[in-house]
Amino acid sequence: MTLEAERATGGGRLSQTPATELLSAWARRGHANQGESGPPAASGLIEFGGGIPDPETLPKDALLAAAARVLAQDAPGALRYGGAQGEELMRRWLAARLNTQEDAGAGPENFFLTSGSGQAIQMVIAAFSDPGDVALVERPSYPGSLRTFRAYGVELAGVDMDEEGVVIDALERTLTTLAAAGRTPRLFYTMPTLHNPTGITTTIPRREAVVELCDRFGVLIMEDDAYGEIRCEGRRPPSYYRLSGGQGALRISTVSKMLATGLRVGWVTGRKDLVDSLTRLRFDGGLSPFLIRTVAEFCSSGDQDAHLEHMIPLYREKRDRTLAALAERCAGQATWTHPEGGFFLWMTLDPAINPAKLRESMQSENVFARTGMQFFPDGGGEHNLRLCFSTLSVADIEEGVRRLGRALDQARF
C-alpha cells in the first residue's frame, strides 16, 4: 500500500474540536488528593478511575520559571501565531531525546506538534483513512481512540492480546482474512508500551513480528506512546518507529502523563512525507509558541529529568502498594497484570463473579473501578476491571482494595 501525501488534503474532514481524554469521575466530584501520609477516605467514594498525574507532582514553580525565561529571551516571538508544524525548538529537543533513548536517527523535520495526543490521533486518522476503511486495534484498547475512528466512519477489527502483547497469530489471521476480502487495513492502532488499559508492555520479539507483518501487508503502524516515560522498572523497549527504520510507523506521544494534562502538548514522529501530509491538514494559526516554548525550555533545561526523578518513585510506590493490597485481599477472586510502570493494571475476574452484581456491590461499598466493556471494539470485557492508581494516596489505595475485595465477595453467583 502506498500512502500518497496528497491524501492529506482529501475532503478537509478535521473536526472543529480535537479528541479529548476521558475526564474521570473523581475530578467531577472534586475529590482531593490527600498525599501519601493522608488518612483513607472513611466514607467517601474511592475511585480507581481516571488516568492522570497525581496533582502533587505538578511542577508549578519550575513551569512558571520556564515561562518567565521564555518571555525574557524573546517575548515577541513567543507571543505570535505558531507555524503549521510547530515550534522548531521543541522539535529539536524531541529529536535529541528520542535519539538518545533509542538511536532513532530522527531530526526536527520528523516531528509534528499537536494539541495533545488526542489531536495527534485524530489528525493521523483524518490524513490516512477514508469513511468505510477498516483499521486494526487491540482488544482491549483506549476507548477515546476507538470513538475517534468511529467518528471518521472507520470500521474496527480487533486483535487479541496476551501477557506479551498483541497475539501474532491473531494479527496475521485477521490481516489475511481482510486482504482476501479486499479490505487491507490502512492503520494498526496500538499502545505497545505500558498499555492503557492493561499496563502490558509488548515484548521485543512480538514488536519485531508486528513490524514484519505490517510491512508485508502494507499497513501503517500508529503507535500510541502516552505512558512510555512513566517507567518504574525494566528497560525501555525500542519503538515501532525505531524497529521499522522510521519507515512503517507513526509514533504519537504527549507531555500529558509525564508533565501535566492541561498543557495539551503532543506530537507525531514519522517519515518526512507523512509529517508533511499532517502539516497540510493544519488550517488554524498553529499551536501557541509561548506554550510550546515554555514546555521546551522546561524540558531542555533539565527540569524534566528532575521532575521524572521525583515522579517515578511515587508511582512505583503506588503500583507496589496496589499489587500488595490485591494479593492480600483479592487472591482467588481475580488475577491481574503486573505493569512495569504507567498508571494502570488490568483485572480478570474469577468466573464465579457476577459482573452485574459486582457493579452493584462496588456502589454499595463506595468504591469505583472502570469495567472492561468500554475498552473493547466489538464486545467483551464483562469480566475485567481497569484500576488506575496514579491519583490516589497510598492510604486510599489500600482502603479501596479492601472495599473492592468486599464487593467481590458479595458478587459471587
Image: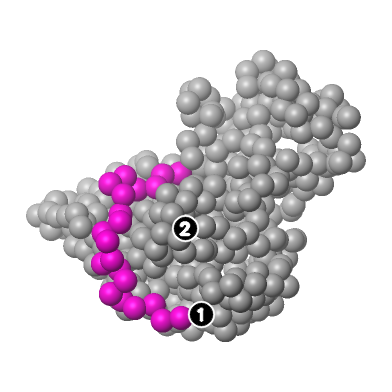
Is residue 332 shown left or right of residue 114?
A: right
Residue stretch rendered in magenta on the structure: 1-21
What amino acid type is highlighted by mark number 1? Gly
Point out the residue furthest to the top here.
43
Q: Is residue 18 magenta?
A: yes
User: Circle 1: is it few (<14), some (14-19), or many (20+) Cα within 10 Å?
Assistant: some
User: Residue at point 77% right, 33% down?
Assistant: 355
- Residue 125: where, in percent of width, then height? 41, 61
- Residue 140: where, in percent of width, then height? 64, 53
- Residue 284: where, in percent of width, then height? 19, 54
Residue 218: assigned label: 1
The answer to whether residue 91 is seen in the rendering is no
Residue 355: assigned label: none
The one nearer the camera, 111 or 312, is 111
Label 2 with label 1: CB-CB less than 8 Å: no
- Judging from the image, the colouring scheme is one colour
User: Residue at point 74% right, 61% down?
Assistant: 162
Is residue 363 shown left or right of residue 66?
A: right
- Residue 266: where, in percent of width, then height? 38, 57
Say which element carries label 1: loop
